């Protein structure tokens, strides 16, 4: 008999992928208890399994790594995003380590969503008693607590675009800046003085395939308003570009849309194409939202 694990043919009829590392153990316990109570066969995978395990069509396979799952063409797929947007401890590490961790968590979530191919997503708003399949229910575990630090709070808001509704509010603190604080301005004002460069760029969080919109609100003073700006949005290698010169001080809003043909990072860049001898710039708010989800084929 041909081994499906060798020729690539999937054979699992029911697959559950745990996308939130902090929730992996809690979900394993909840699923094991539900299986015991309901007399169901649940298999937890820590490596790629042998195809001989898969003859029961009601058997449920659970993994924290999608590479260990072998879904059939008509498989029921469930992704557990529950807990993915809850962060704690980021304020105790360096800014760079916190940024890398957030990017990695976004990658985990996006890979899980992409793997689901439009299947069911279980997020933070899941009911306490949850039906994963027609004949299998589980009690959702408690969500892990969110830290009280500024980074934990910002990170927890940053990944809500992976949940139902597909939108997030991004803190300016998630972005990399290449400018000094504007002297005497206070707050988050940046000094535009200097050579041509990207003033703000980031956050490099991952997006699943689809069309995504960014909305940037910013303030600028009279000197800065005389400068030409370049706003870029999209996958890092294929951004859309908008050039604008505000001409007067005030609060402005820019909206850009772009397509992600495959899972990739999201990059918003605010750049100065020319040198500036003065000017102040401040990001007020950034919102990202999903226009159209396109699961991989």
Image (cartoon, grey):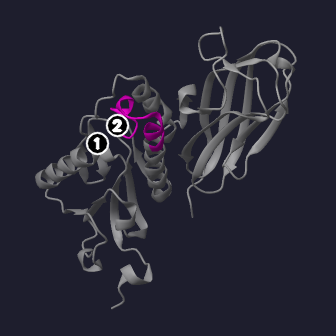
Q: Residue at x 42, y 46 (%)?
A: 121
Above or below for 21 versus 276? below
Above or below for 124 versus 103? above
Q: In the picture provided, is 160 more to the left or to the right than 182?
A: left
Q: Quadrant of residue 198?
A: top right
Q: Give the range drawn in magenta.
A: 84-100
Q: In which quarter of the image is residue 201?
A: top right
Q: Residue at x 24, y 75 (%)?
A: 53
Q: Is any part of residue 215 visible from this angle?
A: yes
Q: Nearer the viewer, residue 276 or 219?
A: 276
Q: Which residue is drawn at 68% across and 45% down?
A: 234
User: Across the whole image, how many numbered discs are drawn on residues?
Assistant: 2
Magenta segment includes 64 = no
Above or below for 266 versus 43? above
Q: Mark 2 points at which residue?
A: 126
Query: CA gap, disc 1 to disc 2?
Result: 7 Å
Q: Is any part of residue 171 visible from this angle?
A: no
**Are the two marked residues, 1 and 2, in contact with CB atoms closer than 8 angstroms?**
yes
SS under mark 1: strand
SS under mark 2: loop
Q: Which quadrant of the rendered structure holds the N terminus?
A: bottom left
Q: Name the residue under label 1.
A: 130
Q: Residue furthest top?
A: 184
Q: Which quadrant of the rendered structure holds the C terminus?
A: bottom right
Above or below for 42 versus 293? below
Q: Which residue is drawn at 56% across and 50% down?
A: 208
Q: In the picture provided, is 94 more to the left or to the right than 173?
A: left
Q: Residue furthest bottom?
A: 1
Q: In the picture provided, is 113 more to the left or to the right than 26?
A: right
């Amino acid at each position: 008999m041909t081994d499906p694990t060798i020729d690539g043919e999937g054979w699992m009829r029911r697959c559950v992928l745990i996308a939130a590392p902090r929730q992996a153990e809690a979900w394993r316990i909840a699923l094991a208890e539900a299986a015991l109570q309901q007399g169901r066969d649940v298999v937890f995978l820590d490596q790629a399994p042998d195809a001989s395990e898969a003859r029961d069509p009601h058997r449920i396979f659970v993994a924290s790594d999608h590479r260990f799952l072998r879904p059939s063409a008509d498989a029921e797929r469930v992704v557990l995003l529950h807990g993915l947007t809850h962060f704690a401890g980021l304020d105790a590490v360096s800014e760079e380590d916190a940024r890398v961790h957030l990017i990695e968590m976004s990658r985990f979530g996006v890979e899980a969503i992409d793997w689901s191919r439009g299947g069911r997503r279980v997020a933070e708003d899941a009911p306490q008693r949850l039906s994963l399949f027609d004949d299998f229910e589980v009690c959702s575990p408690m969500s892990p607590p969110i830290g009280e630090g500024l980074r934990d709070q910002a990170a927890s808001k940053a990944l809500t675009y992976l949940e139902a509704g597909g939108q997030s509010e991004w803190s300016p603190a998630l972005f990399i800046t290449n400018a000094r604080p504007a002297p005497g301005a206070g707050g988050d004002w940046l000094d535009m003085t200097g050579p041509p460069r990207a003033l703000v760029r980031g956050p490099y969080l991952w997006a699943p395939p689809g069309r995504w919109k960014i909305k940037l609100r910013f303030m600028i003073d009279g000197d800065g308003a005389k400068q030409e700006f370049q706003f870029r949005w999209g996958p890092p290698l294929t951004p859309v570009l908008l050039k604008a010169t505000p001409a007067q001080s005030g609060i402005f809003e820019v909206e850009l849309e772009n397509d992600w043909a495959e899972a990739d990072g999201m990059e918003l860049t605010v750049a100065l194409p020319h040198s500036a001898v003065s000017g102040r710039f401040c990001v007020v708010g950034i919102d990202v939202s999903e226009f159209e989800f396109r699961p991989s084929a």
